[in-house]
Amino acid sequence: MKLLVIGCGGVASVAVFKCCQNPVFTEICIASRTESKCVELADRLQPNTKAKLTTATVDADDFDSLVSLMKEFEPHTVLNVALPYQDLTIMDACLECGANYVDTANFEPEDTDDPAWRATYEKRCKEEGFTAYFDYSWQWAYDEKFKKAGLTALLGTGFDPGVTSVFTAYALKHYFDEIHYIDILDCNGGDHGYPFATNFNPEINLREVSANGSYWENGHWVETKPMEIKREYNFDGVGMKDMYLLHHEEIESLAKNIPNVKRIRFFMTFGQSYLTHMNCLQNVGMLSTTPVMFEGREIVPIKFLKALLPDPASLGPRTVGKTNIGCIFRGVKNGEEKCIYIYNMCDHQECYKETGAQAVSYTTGVPAMIGTAMIASGTWSGAGVFNVEEFDPDPYMDALNKYGLPWVVDENPVLVD
Ligand code: NDP
């Protein structure tokens, strides 16, 4: 099966590494803006895989550039691990060329000042009650087009979103008649030794973290100020950590796809140093996406900041510690209340030794490969646009164990108040 991977950053490096271990992928073309990164990755992986690796340059913001590459390579499936800004253009090109589509993050515009986008956004803020720049409406709107074309689009197969939603489908299938409360806990206990760095693309990461938080409760969104809700939790393998409630994209799809759910919250751990740096950068305007004039040329502050911060792909050798990501579910089975916690722990140094990347890229890249393999092998099939929790979770859960993200089920977890 021919796979086109778009993007060649931290997540892509792990996804392609793992695709090379899965015989379903016989030819893989790695295409990105900077082809030298693709060549370096292909050269490193080719000696140890039967898959044929090739590379290409592509500007994924440019429909014509995507279409000409896809017409030449004729992929069965395209894995988009570039940036969320390119989701819609890549989906359009997949429709044009008859390829299935897979990604790990929902659409977000690069230019949040664009008046056409802003009008739709402001209407959605009013109607839905959350103000995040990213949401699923743009990609869900492609459902009819993918149905008509007889193609599959699988959205959000990273860890969160991705594995957390598969954990939810698995809990519902095997442990509950109804799930009422979901708390998604994302803990990174890793230390990279820098005063400040982000574990994945700084622009995407800082936009997400500095925005308002929100959670789903009794059929509607409740929005909070950034970092307004704080809890402490004692994570297996990591220890006690502060965690903060954020808006997160899987809340939106789980609210739609899990019947009778009453509340869904998402918490992520942050150290005080990270928050102090981020607040300072925000206060001086460095997180802004609005261009400013500097010495006669236009610069976008957050893009300039990105150029100064360590490349997330370079954090691998220096990051030590573990991640622990999972979901606590409360609901009913046979009329009795019950509660379980499904989670995965991942060690940064072990990930680095295996793939050359730290655990945040690893925990995203492995599920990116698994979701793509589900579509490529026909294990998951259907025409239209889908989120991962809409398919049978069992083969995906087996693949997590097989490809390096083993999970555990704790039937007596400590709850988050
Ligand atoms: P990186 O910034 O490390 O890599 C992004 C890659 O995309 C780079 O190779 C970049 O090229 C390429 N790219 C950017 N713009 C274009 C373009 N216009 N055309 C072609 N290529 C382009 O990001 P990550 O690897 O950390 O993240 C990848 C994706 O994974 C993101 O969408 C992120 O949001 C998502 N993610 C999802 C998670 C989850 O759990 N679901 C968790 C973490 C990340 P260049 O090298 O030239 O800059």
Image (cartoon, grey):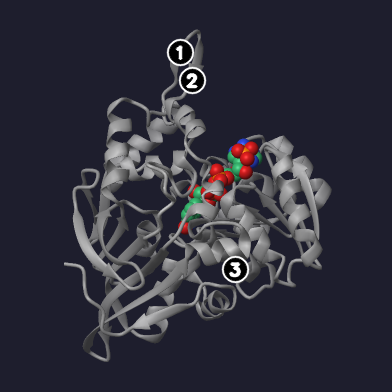
What amino acid type is highlighted by mark number 3?
A: Ile
Callout 2 secondary element: strand
Tell me where residue 60 appears, x and y as whole percent: 65, 39
Where does label 2 land, which residue? 299
Mark nearer the N terminus (3 vs 2): 2
Percent position of residue 22, x then y: 70, 71
At x 54%, y 74%, the residue is 400
Q: Nearer the viewer, residue 149 or 397?
A: 397
Q: Say if mark 2 contacts mark 1, CB within 8 Å.
A: yes
Q: 129 or 199, which lies in front? A: 199
| N-terminal label among 3 and 1 | 1
**Camera-side mark, 3 or 1:** 1
> Which residue was labeled with disc 1?
294
Position of residue 5 in the picture relative to residue 362 (left or right): right
- Residue 211, quarter of the rendered image: top left
Find disc 3 in the rendering and name its residue. Answer: 370
